[in-house]
Image: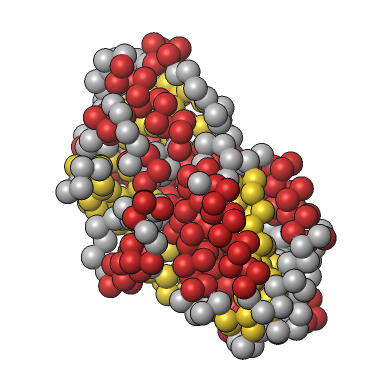
Amino acid sequence: MRNSLLGAVAVAALMLPGAALAQSGTIKIGVLVALEGAFAAGGQDGVRNVELALKQVNNTVAGKKIEIVVAPTDTKPDTTVRMARKLVEQDKVDFIIGPLSGSEGIAMRDFAKTIPDKVVINGISGALETTWVEPARNFYRFNLDGSQWGYGLGSYVVKTKGWKKVATIAADYSFGYTNFMGFAADYCKAGGDIVQRFWQPLGQADFAAIIAQLPENVDAIYLGLGGTDAINFLNQYQQAGEKLRLIGGTIMADQTVLTAKGKAKDALKGTPTSGPFAIDDPSPAWTAYVKLYQDSIPAAQRFPTPSLFGLGYYVATQAAIKGLEGAGGDLSGGQAKFMAALDKLQLDSPVGKITLNENRQATGTVFITEVVDGPDGNLTSKMVGRADNVTQTLGMTAEQFKALGLPSRDVVNCAKLRTGG
């Protein structure tokens, strides 16, 4: 599927006028996206959504044709930087949309500083540090970070579910830390207690040892895994006969997991989670986007509804289009007009209005959902709450947020947070 997808992208690019050269009438966008590893299926949806957004404007912005060049990654930072360098130096792209995964984003923040005359618009990577720690002037993120996505879920499970004691399993890398941090800060402030934490590397296949160690005297297990990692865990969890309730990190209840086959489905039912969208969001912007996605892409080549990864790349491409329109397609002078347009952009996206802070990081809405059976035999989710205008500091002052520490295995310290120490 990956080869056919890349082939279709290449053919589409060749059909565009001036695709062989970066001519003045053509703008070339590099799409940096994971097409190998645990998030390959999500990456494929990302490419589909870039194409979808550009199709809406007939692959033309400000009178200039748009060509895309897809650079596949495997979520590893060194691969990401190598492919980004290829996009800039060999493919001569004008700017980049991407990457997908958390540690990739941090690497791209640093790489962006070496190409200050070219904009980088984040795909869907969600590590906090990307825009929080020494951000790059030319790096923009129009999606919330992983910490923001976790906000609201902790207080929901404490106040609505009454789950005040949990153990956690999460991915042992930057996004896993960040997403967990947002949940933990909210959960601890609401009175919850985290009794044990487990961390797993990306690409894990065997979870038997972790499952055997799970404590029984907890109300639920927080699961911060995604893609094939989440599917492998859930299948093995079911096979082991475990019955503890689950709380899902943002990437655990994405379409890439909800549509999986096997016993994983049974373990997910009733699981609360949070993230940048709700499948049953009744807003006109969301329902129009879902219909466009479903009508434009054959059912066999897509998910029932857009994935988290697809949404991220769609919104990033929307932002690129609006920024180019605001700049009149002028990318001269170190892309100054393009950056100025992006700086002040208030984007009307499928998930509501998105604005940027001084770090060029998005402020927006977080949706709280629960996994339920869908009418088509797949699992889906229903919206049970939302948090609007979620800032990068989760409603705290910058000083209060910094006091939590950077995302890591040990952050958040519940006792310290509750005492204000």
Q: Is residue 112 left or right of residue 400?
A: right
Image position of 323 with respect to 381: above or below: below
**Residue at (25%, 48%) from the top-left corner?**
381
Q: Is residue 88 left or right of residue 269?
A: right
The one of 61 and 234 positioned closer to us in this rendering: 61
Image position of 335 with respect to 228: above or below: below
**Residue at (76%, 75%) from the top-left corner?**
22
In the displayed orientation, state which residue is furthest to the left: 375
**Picture coordinates of residue 36 (x, y %)?**
58, 40
Counting every numbered tag in the picture gives 0
Q: Residue 88 sits in which quadrant?
A: bottom right
**Residue at (75%, 71%) from the top-left corner?**
20
**Residue at (28%, 72%) from the top-left corner?**
284
Q: Is residue 264 left or right of residue 63?
A: left
Is residue 315 in view?
Answer: no
**Picture coordinates of residue 133 (x, y %)?**
67, 51
The one of 165 and 311 positioned closer to us in this rendering: 311
Q: Is residue 79 left or right of residue 311?
A: right
**Picture coordinates of residue 211 (x, y %)?**
39, 16
**Picture coordinates of residue 7 (x, y %)?**
59, 56
Q: Residue 114 sits in which quadrant?
A: bottom right
Is residue 197 in view?
Answer: yes
Q: Residue 62 sits in which quadrant?
A: bottom right
* Way the structure is coloured: secondary structure
Image position of 322 with respect to 40: above or below: below
